[in-house]
Image: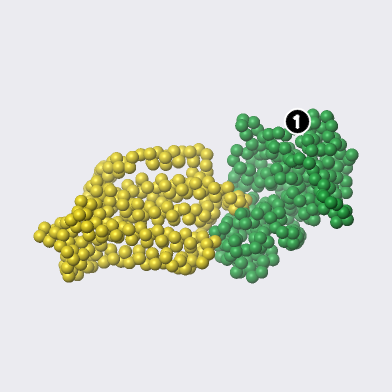
Chain colours: A yellow, B green
Amino acid sequence: MTALDMAPPSVQQAQSVWRLRWKRFRGHRTGMIALGVLVLLVLFTLAAGPLAALWGIDPDSTDLLSRYDPPSADHWLGMDDAGRDELLRLMYGGQISLLVGLVSTLIGGVAGLGIGLSAGYYGGRLDALLMRFTDGMIALPLLPLLIVFGAVDLTKLGFSSEFAHSGAAGFWRVVVIIAVVDWTQMARLVRAATLSLKERDYVLAAKASGASPLYVMAAHILPNVATPIIVAGTLTVGRVILLESVLSFLGFGIVPPTPSWGNMLNNAQELVTTAPALAVYPGLFIFITVIAVNFIGDGLQHAFDPRSSR
Amino acid sequence: MSVATPLLQVTDLTVGFRIDGQVRKPVQGISYSLDAGRTLGVVGESGCGKSLTALALLGLIPAPGQVTGSVRFAGAELIGQPEAAWRDLRGNRVAMVFQEPMTALNPVMPIGTQIAEVMVLHQSLAWPEARDAAIGLLEAVGISSPRQRAASYPHQLSGGMRQRAMIAMALACRPALLVADEPTTALDVTIQAQIIELMQELQSEIGMAIQFISHNLAVVSELADEIVVMYAGRIVERAPAATLFDRPAHPYTKGLIATLPDPDRRQARLPVIQGGVPRIDAFAVGCRFAERCPLADAHCRSVEPTLDPLEPEHWAACFKAGQ
């Protein structure tokens, strides 16, 4: 008998539980609206390529004569401080920001989840070791750490220099850096929840039924920590989008001219008095994204807890 | 019942915890046996070590706890066996029913799934088959429209139904031994009677042995063949149920029996046993019950009595036994 010789959710079993959850999620109105908003945002950002081709505008080409142009028929949201089409840059920037936000949250979340679960469940020395490591990560000053990670030469790590200087490398660099520094909160939350859950009678009952530790964690503890995970996860998405902008500002994230909402917002800081719209647009999109993700989190929480009414 | 070796033979079982540098033993040196198909009642107040004894049978004593002695189950020694062997045993050949079904069932998992889980773990059934089997089990424990109930979550069921579901879960693999830890304590009286009846029915059907733990002597008397009375981690008396009620030997047992309400006697107040179970760090040198015993003398307080036979199948740990 290996530790996890029985996959907790079989296909058929999982289907009915997931179908039930989806049904409960659909019953959560704000959650559904928020999901719609997020889908619209994604579609909006994905429209960047086709629209740029259609209009024949290069989002990176600068035109110093049309800096800060107001909205017009050709450029719906006007031009930015370098005479680039603001709307197209918002779309392209959204692709990066949304992807960074979701992927980093996911990777950091999974890492934090695994660390928190095993620390909380096994306790003792493993717990002490993992939690001191977590404390250490939290104690490290963020900015110097980001700068060090950002300066890592990828070619020295065995990647081809072609990849190291591509846009994909820049993206993954940001994702990995953020995931590395941002799992700690999730780990601590999950550990705390696990500590209390593992003392529950149903965990003892599951052990008395002959379940292995891994099975108990996956089937009995994980679904019961869904609530803190979802709350922390949805809050993280917003924070990560802003963290990306900090990295970009330092020149280690998504480097201009490639736009992201974060670096657009940063650029616009000094222009707030002259061209406030340039700060408002990306700020508004980040705001909408964070709100939407939070409401989706609400809906997910409702869907995962069979006890919640409605 | 004349079986050569009993199904369960517990010898000198001790559970020790190291607290503040000293080893405390909430269960100390207990021995009993249980034949296949029979029911053993374990009674005693809260804190007498009844539940720890049950957990020791399943190898589930929490981490710093040390278990010594011998537990032979179906001829094999359990104490000291590897964790994998324990997992193979739990839920499969030795199953457990817990006191409070609301907390012993996972709140976010449908009960059908929780019952199916045991069979997937032990009988290498696929989930769909196990689910069907779970529906059959729910029907067997007397839950109406089992197909719909299998998809229900614990909070959607009544207390009695939840305990029936717990029993279905425990019996999923037709265990040889069922350990029931206060299975009726959290239920109201009519439901208690139903659950006891159900357990008796299933016992005769499956032929399993039951170790029934309760602080309620009246409940135990309804289904136990033999009764073990525990006090402060020790067995103080052991006898067939009828003998125990007829000729209780230990003052503690007498006290417990006296506290039972009797419709033939008109009493303004029920008698009580004064005091409480001593804390684990305050176990006396002599007899642990001496503090509360009306018969105790200096000898009782200095020397601990051993569990000695009084008559065939009747043991008591008391110098004053029979007085």
Please name the residue shown 66% across and 60% down the image. Answer: B159
Residue A30 shows up from this direction = yes
Given the current orientation, which residue lies at the most extreme right position? Answer: B323
Examine the rendered structure and indicate whether residue A198 appears above or below residue B190: above
Left or right placement of residue A49 versus residue B92 in this view:
left
Q: Quadrant of residue B285?
A: top right
Q: Quadrant of residue B60?
A: top right
Please name the residue shown 74% across and 59% down the image. Answer: B189
Give the residue pinned by disc 1: B285
**Place of residue B175 in the rendered image (x, y in percent of width and height, measured from the top left):** 68, 55
Please name the residue shown 52% across and 43% down the image. Answer: A122
Given the current orientation, which residue lies at the most extreme left position? Answer: A65
Residue B7 shows up from this direction = no
**Mark 1: which amino acid?**
Val
Circle 1: element type: loop
Identify the chain of the residue marked 1, using the numbered disc in the image.
Answer: B
